[in-house]
Image (cartoon, rainbow, N blue to C red):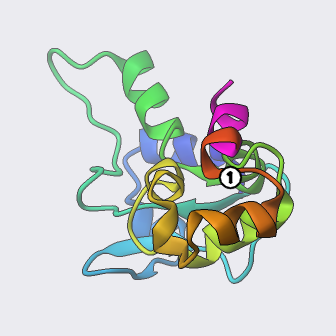
């Protein structure tokens, strides 16, 4: 499902658990596709409770800002790939370890993937710092 469709349904007041099939992550509900795939389909939504994945409305709410906030929490395969500087192997591994957090948080904590800095460089051809610079440039 594309971000636009999910956002439209959230904006209409539908709850995320009615839109996507949520599963249990690390002590919280998340959405995670069965496997990493490139493209613009949403494949991951981090901690639904913490991130308040519902469309906030009412006095004082900026609809455009709210849509931007939610759009940033609906991750496509292409979003995760971009986070990994285009390195598909790393994107797949990152996706596999996600269980509540945003991809940037998990990538920033590379030991979470179980590699030392030397193993990281051998596996991906760049140090974690080099890869991070590529991903955030």
Viewport quadrant of the N terminus: bottom right
Q: Is residue 134 magenta?
A: yes
> What residue span does the magenta drawing correspond to?
131-137
Q: Main secondary structure of the magenta part?
A: helix
Query: Eyeballing the image, is 34 above or below 44?
Result: below
Q: Measured from the top left, where is residue 95 in percent x and y?
A: 63, 69
Depth check, front residue: 116 or 80: 116
Residue hosting label 1: 80
The image quarter in which residue 29 lies: bottom left
Q: Measured from the top left, where is residue 116 in percent x and y?
A: 56, 71
Q: Secondary structure at mark 1?
A: helix
The image quarter in which residue 35 lies: bottom right
Depth check, front residue: 102 or 54: 102
Q: Measured from the top left, where is residue 104 in percent x and y?
A: 51, 48
Query: Eyeballing the image, is 63 above or below 57?
Result: above
Residue drawn 53% across the image and 37% down it? 71
């Amino acid at each position: 499902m594309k971000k636009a469709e999910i956002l439209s349904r959230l904006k209409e007041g539908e709850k995320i658990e009615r839109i996507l099939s949520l599963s249990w992550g690390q002590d919280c509900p998340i959405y995670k596709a069965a496997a990493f795939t490139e493209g613009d389909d949403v494949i991951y939504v981090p901690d639904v409770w913490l991130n308040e994945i519902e469309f906030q409305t009412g006095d004082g709410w900026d609809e455009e800002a709210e849509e931007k906030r939610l759009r940033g929490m609906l991750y496509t395969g292409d979003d995760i790939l971009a986070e990994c500087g285009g390195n598909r192997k790393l994107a797949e591994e990152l996706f596999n370890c996600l269980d509540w957090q945003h991809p940037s948080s998990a990538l920033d904590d590379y030991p979470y993937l179980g590699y030392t800095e030397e193993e990281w460089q051998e596996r991906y051809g760049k140090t974690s710092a080099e890869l991070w610079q590529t991903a955030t440039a």
